Amino acid sequence: MLEIKKLRCMHMKCPRGIDKEPYFSWVLESNDENVVQVSYQLQVTDEENRLVWDSKRCVSGQSTYVEYEGEELKSRTKYVWTISIQDNHGNRAEASSEFETAFLHEGDWQARWVKSPFPVIGRQAHLGEQPPAVLFRQRVILNKKVKKARLYATCHGVYQLTINGNRPDNREFAPECTVYRDYLCYQIYDVTENLKPGENIIGMHVGDGWYHGFMTKAEDKAYDPAFAVLTQLEVTYTDGEVDCFGSDKTVKVKESPVRCSDLFAGERYDANLNPYGWEISGFNDKDWSDAIPVAFGYNNLKAQYGQPVRPIVTLPVKQFLISPKGERIIDFGQVIAGRVRIKIDVPKDTQVTIIHTEGLDAEGNFFDNNPSADQRIEYISAGLAQEYEPHFTFQGFRYVMVEGIEDLKGEDIKAVVLCSEKENAGTFSCSNEDVNRLYENTRWSQYANMISIPTDCPQREKAGWTGDIQVYTKTALLNEDVTPFLTRWLENLICEQKDNGSVPFVVPLAGAYIGQYKMYADQFKTPDAVAPAGWGDAAILIPYYMYCLTGNTYILKKQYNSMKHWCDFVIKTAKEEKPEDSELPQDVEQYLWNTGHHFGEHLIPSYSKDGYGESTFEAIRVSTRYVAPIYGFYSVSSMSEIAKILGNTEDEKYYREMADRMRISFHKGVIDEEGNMPADLMGAYAMPLYYGLVPENYKEKFAGNLIRKIEENKGCLDVGFLGMPILQDALCQIGRQDLAYDLLFNEKAPSWLYEVKHGATTIWESWFALDENGAPFVSEIYGMVFCMSLNHYAFGCVDDWMFRNINGINYEEPGFKRILIQPQLDDRLNWAKRTFTSEYGDIVSEWKKEEEAFELYVKIPCNTTAVIILPDGKRYEKGSGEYRFYTTI
């Protein structure tokens, strides 16, 4: 039986807020083997059941990223799309889904921005140095029965919405983190079931969030420090009449019991100041202030694309600990990003304080591994029992201490894990429990660092570092459907891209990072071009990786001009600038990107044992000499490939020519006449090998040097952020898969399993975050006490290699339209199972071995084909279905 499953519009199920040009995808399922789609017909109808697009019968196997080509879509309209397909066995199937459009024209907004009239203190970094949150209360009178109602809402800050006291959904931190001057999201809620006849109350509780936060607020002349909201309720009655109720001067405002809030510092809540019942009808708001209408405009407003931040799981207390200092510490057993939910029943005016940390010291005492951010919650009791959860903040933590409650029980406190909601895309397990824990650590770090934007860490910085997500994107795609999440972030990257094509190292670039950007700009005399190699390259490499793993041509088209702009910046910079000490001829130098500010490989272990000390900066200077030219070449050559994919032949030819010249200049200007690199480092040999930049006559020497560096390092890692994703692949390329596995299984620092053996539940920022005795790393940078994060996903990119080698799953055509399954065995593993939900459905590779017997089970989704290669070299070509293979090894 042929069925159509997983109907998606813009990668989402029945989405609201779709723009003018959506795309569609679907998955085929069948009990038959060797099933492929031979034709499809896609039809779209509007609310009057009028046909607005009919693709007609298309003889095509395309079932992903089918772009809409019908009439211009109307604002705020629900459309039904129906897909009919026929397979190669003559079977037919049909299925339907729906989507709803956003405000497609600025004139759709009838509401007015209104802001708080209260004076605002200058926001600073520590708890208590922020103004109180604000309650906005709007009355709406309905005199007829409601058929359909939509609420469109956004704010300056972050908000929690209630309709008659109930939240229409459980999203957090709306409107989320974007480049607000150009791109402020609004959210669309179906509030049909929340409304009632008579008086209705729209409540907007607004706190600082990213918009106002000391570390994250924009440096913008139009910035207003006051909280502001914009809401528009559109109601369709059963008689067909439509009413619109927008925020205006009638909105009432009062300071919130949240006396201060900050994403980094925490939150202070005074329950004595809670105006109970404010969010429902019948409440007396006569002593509340009037909101002030303000002309902020609508140019930067866009419906939120992608899933919101939500609580995804709640963790119970694992254990209570008593430290050597006598501290009562609550251990949730897992490092997370989120917050606590706690039952409080203490006398009036008692202050309950909750402090958070990711780790303990070597003796088991509470240790603040994030001294730059308070991560502190303060609750002042009104003398009533209450279950409390902070409103406008989140922390990175595993352990908490609670002061002010003497008899706190385990059932009275939980950890709430927050994350941008995404569909799961993968699982992994094997015979080695430490490797299983490593995989779980990677997944937990991915959850923690995808709260609205891809971040480096969820406690110290919470920033959209471009290099971190660049090296991690492939792993992210293998474990969750992050396409909507990354697509929205890439829109922000376009907003931050400079006129010269350069891309900053943090997106959005705001708050403290503007100061850091200016510091580097002054140091290198590049006011509009602080774009480190491997970080700025996110502009092209992330869309390219998305295409490779999902077949997403839509993202290539959407980001095409941005990608070209980045490559042109690299080419122009290489041509016009050169290092002061360069002695290379101009015909070589002009194709080497090697000036300006860079981070090098970043955190090479042999240079970073002192944290971000002088040796780390020396590593930057040394490794930049090869890292920047390599990434310049890789981005430009990738641009040529992207142009080819999209049929832009002139661009393909131009960027291919530039990449070829960059390769030749690398041979002449980075590798010396004897085949030596400017630094004797693991990454200096691995990266040129992997990226195809080693002349044929030097490949053996480079391979030997790479092997030598690993042996000298006793099988431990000595590459940074940019060397890590390719190190094991470089070893496999030179036939040393055994060394690649040695790196995986090594338990000495620096290694992945060193972290696991030392109790890690997430991926660390540095291999030396905890020493052999469990003592946390502490140093000083820029005059501040500094500790390493215990939750950075970048080094978790090893999972991409595990996916392609342990279970041997790879794509032969982008998006796994044609699949390769070829497990690479190692004596230290007896079995392994990997599942992956591709754009076409589930792929499974599961193998086990007993003595000389080997068994492989594979599952191939409909509309794809696969090549299966067994350890003995036997090769099979299969269509969709489930298969078992047996051989001896």
Image (tube, rainbow, N blue to C red):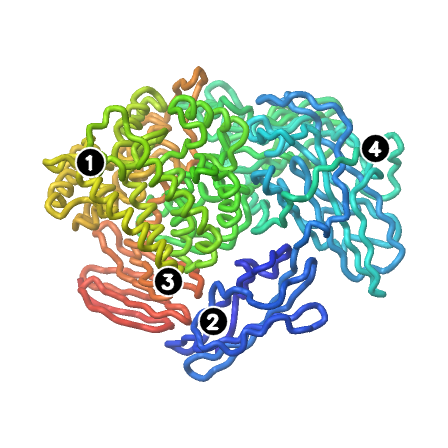
Label 2 amino acid?
Leu
Q: CA distance from mark 3 to mark 2?
A: 14 Å
Report the residue marked by disc 1: 669
The tag earlier along the polypeptide, 4 or 1, is: 4
**Quarter of the figure that contains the C terminus:** bottom left
* Callout 1: SS: helix
Q: Earlier in the sequence, mark 3 or mark 2?
A: 2
Secondary structure of the residue carrying tag 2 is strand
Where residue 704 appears, as percent x and y from the top left, is 12, 41
Q: Residue 33, which numbered label?
A: none
Location of mark 3 (residue): 816
Query: Viewer-proximal residue, 212 or 3?
Result: 212
| Closer to the camera in the image, 379 or 315 | 379
Tell me where residue 252 sits by quadrant: top right
Q: Which mark is residue 28?
A: 2
Tell me the residue that label 4 is attached to: 290
Judge depth for marks 2 and 4 and give the one in front.
4
- Name the kind of residue labelled 3 in the image: Phe
The amino acid on which the numbered mark 1 sits, given as a three-letter code, is Gly
Q: Earlier in the sequence, mark 2 or mark 1?
A: 2
At x 34% / y 66%, what residue is drawn?
818
Q: Percent position (x, y) of residue 301?
A: 64, 45
Name which residue lies at 72% across and 26% down: 270
Which numbered disc, 3 or 4, marks the residue that appears first in the sequence?
4
Give the Cα distance between marks 2 and 1. Answer: 52 Å
